Each structure stands twice: as structure tokens, then as C-alpha cells.
């Protein structure tokens, strides 16, 4: 299972080469080792919902076009899917790509909104809430980490064996891609309201226009394929997941609001 990546849409504008190095060259390095192994392993790897880019049709389905990336990060993940196709076709590697939709929870990434919103609300700092053109709502298909883990295990459990050995292909091999999301996009303003209730602190909201840095207005997963093939069934709504995250955050970092007074 290959989950390592340089993640995040915004930092890609500052350091594009780190994304190419990790997400493209890094994936090729993994696949090179796997293709030469005997027996070859089956590989499950992390793609991203960002490959849907500027798609306006929702919910996003695996059959939709993915050739309009809105960020360099998205472009590197799309490139990964094409590279996976190549190694599957030439070397018989069994490959499953998972398009994750806004994964959150304990031990998450500090650069993601739910995480730094929590930190800044506790510190009394204002938090940026983006809105699209004409006051359009920005929404995300937030998916709790435990549900994502179940999807990953489902992908591993259903992965078929690779068909090559030592780089030589002996027959057609499995090639799959799945959406792993929660199927219920939530406006970012609602996310903030839930955090306010859980933290018992009023947020200082700073409404801003959605910048042209690769962020898209909304994400929404069609997960029917993963349900059918992997038995994937997310069970954690945002309220429940954020409650678990906040409990972890306060135990890990302490209540910074109190300690800073």
C-alpha cells in the first residue's frame, strides 16, 4: 500500500518540484521495484479527488473526465493514474488507485482547514472562510479517517495478483480506481459552526473570495462502485467525526485558549 505523497493544493504553487519529485518520481520508483520483484505484489495507492478538477457535474463518478486539473497537485495525481496504467499494461502489475475525498480526523494534516480552524478559533484568531463567485457556497465531501481505512482494507482484500515476474507480463492484470468519499458535501461555514459548538468558542469569521490557487468550489463523491466492489460504506457524519477530532486535539495540544491567557 503506497500512501506517501506531497499533499495539498496551495503549497504546490510555492514548491512545484516537491510535488513532481514525490508524486510522480516517487511513484515510478515504487513501481520499478515492484515490477522487478518475483512474485510481483499487487499495489493499492493514493490518488485524489482533486483529479476531477474543474468538472461541474456532480456527484463525481469514476467514469467522468479527469483531464482538467485545477492545481499542480491534481495534475501530479492524474499523472500517477496514467503511469499506473502504463505499468499495468506493460508489466502486468495489479494496481488500484483510491481517490480520497477530504480526509479528516485525529493525527490529520495541520495544513487542512478543519485542523487550523480549530487551532485559530482556540487562539482567538480570525479564520478565512472562502466563498465562490456571486457568494457561492464552498463545500467539501469530508470523509472520516476510519471510513477511509475501511476502504483501503477493502481494496487490499479484493486486489488480484499481478501477472508478471521480473518485469515480464504473462497476462492481463487488474487495474482499478475508486472514489472513497462520504457522499454528503458540507458547506465550510457549517464545518465552522460545528467546531464552535464543540470548542464552546465563537469563531471570528473572515469571509474571503476563493483564490485562484487550485482550490475548487465543491467536491462530492459517487461511491457506488466502491460500495459494490469493496463493500465500502462510510458511517461517520461530520458532527461525529469532528467531535472525535476535537477530543484528540485538546488531549494532544491542550486547550491553548486557556494556556495563552
Image (spheres, rainbow, N blue to C red):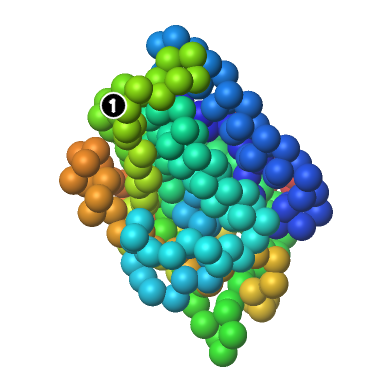
Quadrant in the picture for residue 14 = bottom right
Residue at position x 35%, y 56% from top? 62
Q: Nearer the viewer, residue 10 or 19?
A: 19
Residue at position x 48%, y 61% from top? 66
Report the number of discs.
1
Q: Is residue 5 above or below residue 131?
A: above
Image position of 233 (left or right of 117): left
Residue at position x 76%, y 57% from top? 13
Farthest top residue? Answer: 38
Image position of 185 (left or right of 72): left
Farthest bottom residue? Answer: 134
Residue 176: image location, x then y, percent: 35, 42
Residue count near mark 1 (Cα–Cα under 10 Å), binned few <14, some 14–19, many ≥20? some
Q: Which residue is mark 1?
A: 160
Q: Is residue 175 above or below residue 160?
A: below
Residue 238: image location, x then y, percent: 38, 54
Q: Nearer the viewer, residue 260 or 90?
A: 90
Residue 155: image location, x then y, percent: 32, 33
Q: Is residue 73 above or below residue 254?
A: below
Q: Nearer the viewer, residue 131 or 221?
A: 221
Residue at position x 61%, y 55% from top? 75
Image position of 201 (left or right of 230): right
Residue 91 visible in the current orientation: yes
Q: Nearer the viewer, residue 158 or 171?
A: 171
Q: Is residue 22 above or below residue 139?
A: above
- Element type at mark 1: loop
Residue 100 visible in the current orientation: no
Amino acid at each position: 500500500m503506497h500512501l506517501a505523497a506531497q499533499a495539498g493544493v496551495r503549497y504546490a504553487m510555492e514548491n512545484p518540484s516537491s510535488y513532481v519529485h514525490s508524486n510522480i518520481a516517487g511513484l515510478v520508483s515504487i513501481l520499478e521495484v515492484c515490477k522487478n520483484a518475483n512474485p510481483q505484489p499487487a499495489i493499492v495507492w493514493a490518488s485524489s479527488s482533486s483529479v476531477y478538477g474543474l468538472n461541474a457535474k456532480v456527484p463525481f463518478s469514476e467514469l467522468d473526465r479527469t483531464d482538467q486539473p485545477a492545481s499542480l497537485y491534481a495534475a501530479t495525481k492524474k499523472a500517477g493514474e496514467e503511469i499506473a496504467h502504463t505499468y499495468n499494461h506493460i508489466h502486468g502489475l495489479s494496481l488500484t488507485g483510491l481517490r480520497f475525498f477530504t480526509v479528516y480526523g485525529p493525527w490529520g494534516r495541520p495544513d487542512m482547514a478543519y485542523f487550523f480552524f480549530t487551532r485559530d478559533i482556540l487562539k482567538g484568531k480570525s479564520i478565512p472562510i472562502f466563498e465562490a463567485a456571486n457568494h457561492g457556497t464552498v463545500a467539501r465531501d469530508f470523509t472520516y479517517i476510519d471510513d477511509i481505512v475501511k476502504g483501503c482494507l477493502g481494496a487490499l482484500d479484493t486486489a488480484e495478483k499481478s501477472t508478471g515476474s521480473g518485469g515480464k507480463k504473462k497476462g492481463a492484470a487488474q487495474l482499478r480506481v475508486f472514489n472513497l468519499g462520504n457522499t454528503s458535501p458540507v458547506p465550510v461555514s457549517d464545518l465552522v459552526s460545528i467546531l464552535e459548538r464543540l470548542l464552546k468558542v465563537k469563531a471570528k469569521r473572515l469571509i474571503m473570495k476563493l483564490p485562484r490557487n487550485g482550490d475548487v468550489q465543491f467536491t462530492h463523491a459517487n461511491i457506488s462502485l466502491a460500495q459494490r466492489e469493496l463493500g465500502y460504506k462510510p458511517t461517520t457524519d461530520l458532527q461525529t467525526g469532528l467531535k472525535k477530532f476535537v477530543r484528540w486535539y485538546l488531549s494532544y495540544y491542550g486547550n491553548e485558549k486557556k494556556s495563552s491567557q
